[in-house]
Image (cartoon, grey):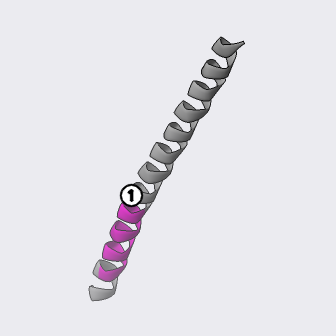
């Protein structure tokens, strides 16, 4: 019985870590995309 508790606890913790990692990756990547978007819009308005 203890094996299953440890297995599901480890699965839960790994899942949470993956979720947090992917969320951070998406936030950072999205911020970079927005910076590129604004830079392109500024370059077009300057022309």
Circle 1 residues within 10 Å: few <14, some 14–19, many ≥20: few
Q: x and y percent of residue 3 in the render?
A: 64, 12
Please, which residue is most extreme toward the right here? 1
- Nearest the viewer among 6 and 31 is 6
45 versus 37 height, above or below: below
Quadrant of the drawing holding the C terminus: bottom left
7 versus 33 height, above or below: above
Q: Is residue 24 left or right of residue 2?
A: left
Residue at the image point whose x is 61% and y is 32% from the top: 12
27 versus 40 height, above or below: above
- So how many labels did they put on this image? 1
28 versus 42 height, above or below: above
Q: Is residue 43 left or right of residue 24?
A: left
Q: x and y percent of residue 46 in the render?
A: 27, 87
Q: x and y percent of residue 31 in the render?
A: 40, 64
Q: Main secondary structure of the magenta part?
A: helix
Residue at the image point whose x is 33% and y is 73% from the top: 40
Q: x and y percent of residue 4 in the render?
A: 68, 16
- Nearest the viewer among 42 and 14 is 14
Let me know if residue 9 is in the magenta part: no
Quadrant of the drawing holding the N terminus: top right
Residue indicated by mark 1:
28
Question: Dividing the picture into quarters, in which one does residue 9 lie?
Answer: top right
Give the magenta part as a residue range: 31-42
Secondary structure, mark 1, is: helix
Q: Is residue 11 left or right of residue 45?
A: right
Please, which residue is most extreme toward the bottom here? 46
Question: Dividing the picture into quarters, in which one does residue 13 lie?
Answer: top right
- Nearest the viewer among 7 and 28 is 7
Residue at the image point whose x is 44% and y is 52% from the top: 24
Residue at the image point whose x is 28% and y is 79% from the top: 43
């Amino acid at each position: 019985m203890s094996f299953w508790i440890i297995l599901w606890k480890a699965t839960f913790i790994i899942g949470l870590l993956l979720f947090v990692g992917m969320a951070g990756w998406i936030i950072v990547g999205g911020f970079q995309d927005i910076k590129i978007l604004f830079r392109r819009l500024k370059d077009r308005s300057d022309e």
